[in-house]
Image (cartoon, helix red, strand yellow):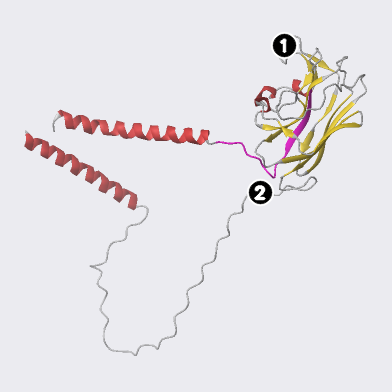
């Protein structure tokens, strides 16, 4: 065997290993890239009222269900200043959020909020953690302040901004979205005895509000019974004879290999084949010398 042949034989295991690793990396990458959010039609979700003033003090509570809010309760309150800044200050308010359990009507609200003299809103919305896939529909959204209805949307506008993190966010006030008919923001209630409420309908789930969820998974098919083989018709009993029946010849029958032994047999055959190839390569190389 010459040096070139030996190097090729030594390199084969490394090449096989590299190919296997590369294939695994490609498979993992394609799986993560294809991942898309989905909605559990028999699941439960949440909704909350979000507002922001635009007259100078920037009093807000956007209620987004995203990673920025994970692990903190600060987003649940009306406040001024950024969550992580020294200027952060919680403001008097009481929010009522809802758990969405099936198709039906739901209401989120804010009561007794101290807007500290602010006169206009720059944002008002209903934030949810329902993935925006189009399977869950919203309708008949009514906005009331101190009991008076200011606006009603037959089909609420779903915000596609990255802050919604791919979830359904129903807009009421937002002047930055093209094609959205925003409510006039000059409607901040004064004093500390006030109420802002938004009622909306939800549809698309596999169950209704007040009912038990109906699983949406497709049940596994039931195994079918194999019909029993038909019994052969009765045949007449053979007459007794004095001839002796010879024993069956088993010399031509093939041996039966069990499932446990079969992998070992296959491996032995592969090893023998590899040894044969190496021997032939060595023999041919030796003749060329």
Residue at (81%, 21%) from the top-left corner?
121
How many numbered discs, if any?
2
Residue at image mark 2: 216
| Residue 28 on image: x %, y % | 47, 34
- Dot 1 falls on a residue whose secondary structure is loop
Image quarter (top left, top right, bottom left or bottom right) of the C terminus: top left
Residue at (53%, 36%) from the top-left corner?
34
Image quarter (top left, top right, bottom left or bottom right) of the N terminus: top left
Residue at image mark 1: 85
Task: Tell me the tag on residue 236.
Answer: none
Q: Quick one: label 2, few (<14), some, or many (20+) residues within 10 Å?
A: few
| Residue 72 on image: x %, y % | 72, 22
| Residue 142 on image: x %, y % | 84, 35
Q: Which residue occupies the foreground of this view, 255 or 29?
A: 29
Furthest residue in direction top, as rendered = 86
Decide whether residue 49 is among the magenta residues. Answer: yes
Magenta residues (range): 35-51
Residue at (78%, 48%) from the top-left corner?
211
| Residue 241 on image: x %, y % | 30, 89
């Amino acid at each position: 065997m010459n040096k070139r042949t030996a190097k090729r034989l030594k390199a084969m295991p490394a090449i096989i290993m590299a190919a296997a690793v590369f294939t695994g990396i490609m498979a993992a990458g394609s799986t993560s890239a294809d991942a898309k959010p989905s909605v559990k039609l028999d699941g439960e979700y949440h909704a909350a009222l979000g507002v922001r003033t635009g007259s100078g003090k920037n009093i807000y509570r956007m209620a987004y269900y995203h990673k920025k809010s994970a692990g903190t309760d600060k987003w649940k309150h009306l406040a001024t200043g950024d969550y992580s800044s020294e200027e952060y200050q919680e403001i008097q308010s009481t929010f009522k959020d809802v758990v969405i359990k099936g198709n039906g009507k739901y209401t989120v609200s804010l009561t007794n909020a101290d807007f500290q003299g602010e006169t206009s809103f720059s944002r008002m919305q209903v934030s949810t953690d329902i993935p925006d896939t189009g399977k869950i529909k919203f309708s008949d959204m009514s906005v009331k302040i101190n009991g008076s209805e200011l606006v009603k949307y037959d089909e609420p506008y779903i915000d596609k901004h990255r802050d919604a993190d791919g979830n359904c966010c129903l807009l009421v006030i937002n002047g930055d979205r093209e094609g959205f008919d925003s409510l006039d923001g000059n409607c901040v209630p004064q004093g500390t005895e006030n109420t802002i409420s938004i009622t909306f309908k939800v549809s698309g789930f596999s169950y209704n509000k007040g009912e038990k969820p109906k699983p949406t998974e497709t049940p596994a098919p039931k195994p079918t019974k194999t019909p029993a083989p038909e019994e052969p018709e009765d045949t007449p009993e053979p007459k007794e004879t004095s001839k002796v029946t010879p024993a069956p010849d088993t010399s031509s029958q093939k041996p039966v290999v069990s499932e446990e032994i079969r992998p070992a047999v296959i491996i032995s055959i592969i090893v023998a084949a590899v040894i044969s190839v190496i021997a032939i390569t060595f023999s041919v190389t030796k003749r060329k010398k």
